[in-house]
Image (spheres, rainbow, N blue to C red):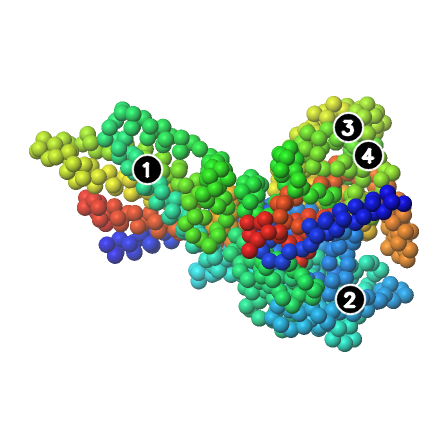
Amino acid sequence: MLKKLIATTALALVMGGVAEAQTPRSGGTIRFTAPYGSSFANLDIHTSNRAQDEIWAKAIHRTLYNWDSTNNKPALELATSVTVSGDGLVYTYKLRNDAIFHHGRAMTADDVIWTFTRLMDGTKAYPGARYIRIIKGAVEVEKGQAKEISGLKKIDDHTLEITLTEKVDPGFYFYPSMLSIYPADEATKESFNARPVGLGPYKFAEYVPGSRLTAERWEKFYKPGKPYADKVVVSIIGEAAARDVAFRNKEIDASILGPTQYVAYKADPNLSKGILEVAEVYTRVMGLNPSFKPFSDKRVRQAINHAIDADLIIKRLNKEKAYRATSWLPLSSPAYDSALKPYAYDPEKAKKLLAEAGYPDGFEFEWTATSNESWGIPIVEAVIPMLEKVGIKVKIKPVEGTVLSEVARKGEYQAFIWSLSTGPDPLAALKCFHSATPQSACNYTLFKNPEFDKLLDEAGAAADPEKQIANLKKANAILYEEAPMWFFNYNKAVMAYQPWLKGLQPNATELAIQNYEEMWVDESSPAAK
Amino acid sequence: MLSFIVRRLLQTLPIILAVAAIIFVLFSVIPGTFASSMSDDGRSVLDAEVMARMNKEFGYDDPVYIRFGKYIADLATFDLGTSFRSRQPVTSVIADRLWPTAQLTLASMLFAIAMGVPLGFIAALRPGSWVDMVSMVTAVSGLSLPKFWLGLMLMYLFALVLGWLPSFGYGDGSLRYLILPSIALGVAPMALLARTTRAAVLEIMNADFVRTARAKGMSERRVVQWHLTRNALVIVLTTIGLQFGTVIGQAVVVEKLFAWPGLGSLLVDSVTLRDIPVVQGSILVIVLLFLLINMLVDVLCAIIDPRIKYS
C-alpha cells in the first residue's frame, strides 16, 4: 500500500513538473518559415490553393472548420455546434458569437454567406469553388443563373443552415484556408488586398513582397488566453541550404527538412532533439496509362510493382524520409489497411507475369518525371536498372511540375511519377478512381472497375461510419490488386524546431501549416521579448 | 548631347519590341499554363471547370495573334497587364521588387568597382610581380566560383561561424542584410573588372602618347594620373556598364539563396508558375535597365574622352 502511495505521489510530481514545464508563455515572436519556393501569391487567400500561401493565412484567417491534428479530422472552428438532418443533407450551424474580425466587428451568418457566394463568382476562377459546389444552388450562381446560393439560409445572425447536394462530411470541404471567412463590408474595399482583415489569432501588420509577412496578436481572438506570442513572422526561404544555415544560426524557429538534411539532423546530438515527423497524406506513385497497350494488362502493372525494390530506394535515396506504400490510402488515413502488405520485390515473379501477359522480352516505355529529389528523376534513374532486369526499358521525359500536372490531366503520357494528395478524406481520395471521375479531375489512370464504384457509392451513402470505413478499405484493396500505379511511398514530413518553440501540431495534411495560436516560445528564444 | 540621348532612346524602341515579341512567342509555345501550375504540387487538384474559367479569364482561349495584338497595344500605353497570380497590375508587382534589386545591384557593383579596378591597376603597374600574380589568381578564382556555393560559404562563415551578419532575408533593408548577397553577386564582376583594367592599363602603358609623355620628362605620377587613368577609364566604364546588366540578370541565384525579394526571384517564381504577364514585364524592365545603363555609360565615356563624338 505504502509502495503504491509513493509511486502514485512520485508520478504526480513528475506529471506536475511536466505540466509546469509545458505551461504556455505569453510574449515573444514566432519566427516561422514558408519553405515551398515561391513568394506568396498575394494577400487574398481566396485566390490561392498553395500550401505556401496557407502558411501565412493560418495566422490571419479562419474557416468554418479547422483541421484537428491531434484527432486527425476536421473540427468545428467558427461554429460552436452543428445539427444534421436525418437524410444527412441539411447542416444547421450555431456560429460563434465571440468571433470578432480584426476591424472590430463580430462575425455573423451574412459573412459566411457573402464569402461562399464570392467564391462561386463565375467570372473569377477561385480555386475554392470546387468545395462550395457541394452546397445546393452553388452551381447556379457559378453559371450566372442565380445571384444567391439557395442552399445557404440565414436563420438569425448566428445560425446558418447549409443544404448539401450529396451526403458528405462538410468538414473535409470547408476547412482549407482558401475558404476563409471574410468580413462582407471590408472585403469589398480595395484596401483589403493590401491589408487583409480576418478572424485569425493574429492581425496583419506588414508584408514585404517576396520576403516576409508579419502579424501581431489579436487581443479579441475567440479562444481565451490565446494566442500566446506577440507576433508571428513568416519568412519565405525556399532554398533548403539557406534554411539550414538560418536554422543552425537560430534565426528561425522551425524548418522543413529534405532527405539530406534529415540524415544530418538525426545524426546531430543537439538537432535530433527537435525533430517532428508526420506521415502526411501524400502518396508517391508511378501512374500507368492504360492507353499504352502493355499497361492495359493488369499482369504487367503487377509485374512492375514486383520488379522494383522500393524499400531499397526509400533507404538509399529517400534516406528513410518516407514510408513504404501498400496501396493508395496513406498511413494517416482512417481507412488505411495495416493488414495489406506491399508488393514483394520479386524479379522472377515479375518476369513470369510479363511472360503470361505476352511480353517475355519486355518492352520500352516513356516515363515523364520532374527533377524532384524525392519522387522525380533521381528515383526514376534508380528504378531503370531494376526494370531492365526484367526486360523493361525506360526513356526518361524530363518536365517541370506545371507540365507534369498538364500531361497527367490530359493523359499525354505513358507513365508519370508524382506525389499526390491522398487525404485527408479517404472517400474523396478514392473517388479519384471512380469511373465517373474524369481524367482531367484526378482519375489520371482512367481507372474503371464496377466493383470499386459500387463499394464507393455505398460508402458515400452509408450512415454507419464503420461500414463506410470497411467499404473504403475494400476499395483500397481493389486498387492494390489492380495496380493502376506503382505504389512507391507515403511522405514522411519532417520539421526541425528549436528547443524554445512549443506547441507544434503533427498536421498530417501538411506539416508546414500550423495553428499559430497553439504555439509559444519560452524565454530561451532569441526573440523571447 | 541632348540629340545623342534622344537618338539612343529611339534606338531602344526596336530592341524593346523585338524582345517583347521573342518573349511572347517563347511563352506561347512552351507547355503549361497558370491554371495547370496550381496543381503542380499534387496537393490540391483544380477541377476542370475552374481551370477552364481561369484559362478564359487570363485569355488563353483567344488565338495567339489576338493575344499578341492586345499585348502590344497595352504595351504602347505602358500597361504591362495584370498578374495571373496576384491579380494586381504587373507594374505594381514589379515596382515592389525594383528597390531591393536596385540596392543589391548597386551594392554589388560598388563592391566590384572598389575592389576590381584598384586590383587591376596595381597588377598592371607591376606586371609579373607577386602583386600581379596574387591579384590575377584572385580574379580568375572570382570568375570561376559558382555564386550559389560562394553565397553558402559566406553565410556559413559570416553568419554561422562568426555571427557578424544575418544569413538571409531583407530585414529592414539595412546594410547588414545587404552585405553578404552583394559580395556573393559582386565577386564575378570584380574579377572581370580587375582583368579588364589590367589589360587596358598595360595596353595604354605601351602607347605612343605615354612614351612621349615620359620622354618629355613628365613624372610617373602625372603619367598615371593624366594619361593612363583617363584613357583606361573609357574601357573600364564600358565594362562596368555591361556588367551592370549582367549582374541584374545573374541576381536570380543570389536572390533565391538569400531570400532577397528582388526582380530576379520574382522572375523565377513567375516562370515556374507561368504568370506570363509578370515574366514579360520583368524581362522588359531588365532589358530597359540594361539599355539605359549602357546609354549612360556611353554619355560618360564621351565626356571623359573628347575623341568620342556624340554623332
Q: Report whether mark 2 lies on the same chain as mark 3.
A: yes
**Residue situated in front as seen by the camera: A243 or B64:** A243
The answer for how far apart the CA atoms under marks 2 and 1 are is: 67 Å
Disc 2 residue crowd, few under 14, some 14–19, many 20+, Cα 10 Å:
few
- Horizontal arrangement in the rendering, residue B257 relative to residue A33 (left or right): left
Residue at numbered disc 1: B116
- Mark 2 vs mark 1: in front: 2
Residue A351 seen in the figure: no
Q: Report whether mark 1 lies on the same chain as mark 4.
A: no
Q: Amino acid at mark 3?
A: Ala
Q: Earlier in the sequence, mark 2 or mark 3?
A: 2
Q: Amino acid at mark 4?
A: Pro
The answer for how far apart the CA atoms under marks 3 and 4 are is: 12 Å
Residue at numbered disc 2: A80
Query: Which element is circle 1 on?
Result: helix
Residue at numbered disc 3: A307
Residue at numbered disc 4: A342
Label 4 is found on which chain of the structure?
A: A
Query: Which element is circle 3 on?
Result: helix
